[in-house]
Amino acid sequence: MPAEGLVYVIDDDPAMRDSLDFLLESAGLKARLFESAVSFLDALPELGPGCIVSDVRMPDLDGLELLRRLRETNKSLPIIIMTGHGDIPLAVEAMKLGAIDFIEKPFEDDRLIGTITTALSGVAQRHKGDAVAADIASRIASLSQRERQVLDGLVAGLSNKLIARDYDISPRTIEVYRANVMTKMQASSISELVRFAIRGGLLKD
Amino acid sequence: MPGHIPPANPFDDNLLQHGLEDSGIGTCDLNLATRELALSPTACKLFGLSPDESIDYTRFLSLLEPEDRERTERGIERSIADGTNFDIQYRIATPHGATHWLRTRSAVVKGQNGAVHLSGIVIDIEEQKQLEAALRVREGHLRSILETIPDAMIVIDGRGIMQFFSKAAVRQFGYSESEAIGKNVSMLMPNPDSARHDSYLERYRATGERRIIGVGRIVSGKRKDGTIFPMHLSIGEMQTEGEPYFTGFVRDLTEYQQTQARMQELQSELVHVSRLTAMGEMASALAHELNQPLAAISNYLKGSRRLLASDTEENRAKIESAMDRAAEQAIRAGQIIRRLRDFVSRGESEKRVEKASKLIEEAGALGLTGAREQGVSLHFNLDPDHDLVLVDRVQIQQVLVNLFRNALDAMTESAQRIMIVTSSRAAGDMIEIAVSDTGHGIGKEHQARMFQTFFTTKKTGMGVGLSISKTIIEAHGGRMWTEDNPAGGATFRFTLPAAPSEGLTDAG
């Protein structure tokens, strides 16, 4: 049951574009490929409804800058950002700039396709205020003060060591808090944790 | 009162008197009973009197420089009392205010009439005194120069007996001058040098072959309290009246070595940090770069998997093509990793022909400080026939110092502490150097990871030393490996390319 609209893939790596095209096609999605954010923005006025999947690190104009430019246009296409593994600060920044989600390369096809399908169906825009967000907010509320500090540190992209230094406690202790945070937030990975934190309204500009 | 009757005189007293007078020797005679003083004309001249002036004992004393008066009087009184000869040097105040050195030698004699006299000669010793003073000034200068040299200076004779031991030597070795002079210099060395030093001297005397003279080397010294310290020794040779003397200049390298150690520490920290930075930067760049082909491969495979679910013939061609493209991306990933390898193994070094024994000795002076105090017994079994290696001296010494320190560290809690360094010929025109200890050993579980960067079994180690050592050895074309000894402890071995002993000269 293909969703409406095209997937606009922006990546400077030809193999990434080609393989994404292949993957999306195998899932019944139609893609249009752009080798740079610049060529995408050039084509933007004539583009129909759809969803953007863009790499974050690109020469000339990167994913974050693309998000800023898109804010200035009246076209509001949902945008999913692809980041490298562990690029938490970039991902957080992208979410602040209005990306609906971020996925780490290499990615699970189900999650990518699921996110794209959701974006195309327009559900993403209604995310805030829905039941999921309320649930996540209550998980955040259940954290102790120290756990909350650790969560803030992780979402800011800090390492255990740096968080430990900020609060003057041992990295070993941070590990324990971190494990508690992951459990309480029901997150299976650090990127999921960040995603939850964002959905739970933790990020303020 | 003792006294002598002059023996029968074979000389003509008059002639003798003239001879003495003309050669500047005055005569004087003190009658001890009357205290009358008779002076010959030359004596009068020496005392600054007119030739025939008569003078008594009190007047004589008044002519003396005040400082010398009491001493002179005491000397005369003692001669009178004991009947001993009188020999004293004193200054006469001349009418011009200057002083003049004289020497008087006389004996107590009995005159013909039984009167006791103190009779003798007066000579001018001003010139001699001036020479002595000049000599003293020069010696003082020389001494002060020697004492301001921070290097210790020790002079030994041909048998190794210390003749001179400078202030700096006292400071460095802890022996006082009197404790050192007259003793064999071997007391300033640890074994084996201490036991062998006499034979070194003998060998030099027999063969004339210079091993340290004029060259200067880093060796170990032993202080009075038994501590061993690294020192730089340079030796000069001189011949004085047919006897050989050796002058050694000793520079204590303890401080230098501490500075070096600190520098090495900082350097290895720097290596650590710079490697971390370089690796961190490289890792993040590589992670991104490797992610591209990996993500692409994943996409091709996941897509293919989806197409396989709807099993139609037209999908087959698509899947085949996707497989090919996935394989290409896998190769791309491999190339990225190859680039990383090339980066890591980069670097040139300066290689020269060196004596392995010398490298080991010098590294030992730096790396084995404190070993004997820890009760470690050191053995060196070095093959003199296979000694020349083609290496970067500094790098190999770094490896050796590192292995030595590791061995010492490993033995701190051992009951038996023996370290053996051996060198021997190895296959493939290599020379193998082994450092073995009786420490805690490595253990099977760590054996494989021993040379990995940042792997350490030490409480305060960084895990950099051995991995760098191995890199250095491999860059020399050698191998480095380790094994546990059957009787406990570990042996670290490495090979270095042997340098051909012939064919290196310019001859022909």
Image (cartoon, coloured by chain):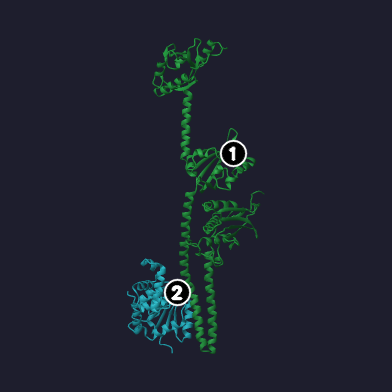
Q: Report the residue at 41% width, 68% height from top.
A: A171
Relative to B132, say whether B272 is above or below.
Answer: below
Q: Position of residue B345 (x, y in %)?
A: 54, 63
Image-quadrant location for residue A115: bottom left
Kind of residue at disc 1: Arg
Q: Residue furthest right?
A: B508
Secondary element type, mark 1: loop
Q: Which mark is residue B191?
A: none
User: What chain is tagged by disc 1?
Assistant: B
B347 is higher (above) or lower (below) than B220: below
Chain letter of mark 2 equals A
Determine whether the residue tagged by mark 2 lies in a helix, strand or loop.
loop
Q: For the point 50% across and 86% down, which residue is it?
A: B306
Residue B94 showing in the rendered view = no
Q: Are marks 1 and 2 in contact (CB under 8 Å)?
A: no
Q: Residue furthest front?
A: B1
Any idea which chain is the green one in this picture? B
The amino acid type, in three-letter code, at marker 2 is His
**Which tint was used for chain A?**
cyan
**Relative image position of residue B255 (x, y in whole percent):** 47, 49
Q: Which residue is mark 2?
A: A85
User: Which of the 4 image quarters holds residue B470?
Assistant: bottom right
* Image height of B111 relative to B97, above or below: above
Report x, y in % for residue B440.
Answer: 54, 61
Query: In this view of the protein, can residue B206 be seen by the observer?
Result: yes
Quarter occupied by residue B11? top right
Front-most of residues B323 and B30: B30
> Residue at image x 54%, y 71%?
B335
Q: Is residue A101 left or right of residue B115?
A: left
Give the residue number, with chain letter if any, for mark 1. Answer: B159
Q: CA distance from mark 1 to mark 2?
A: 76 Å
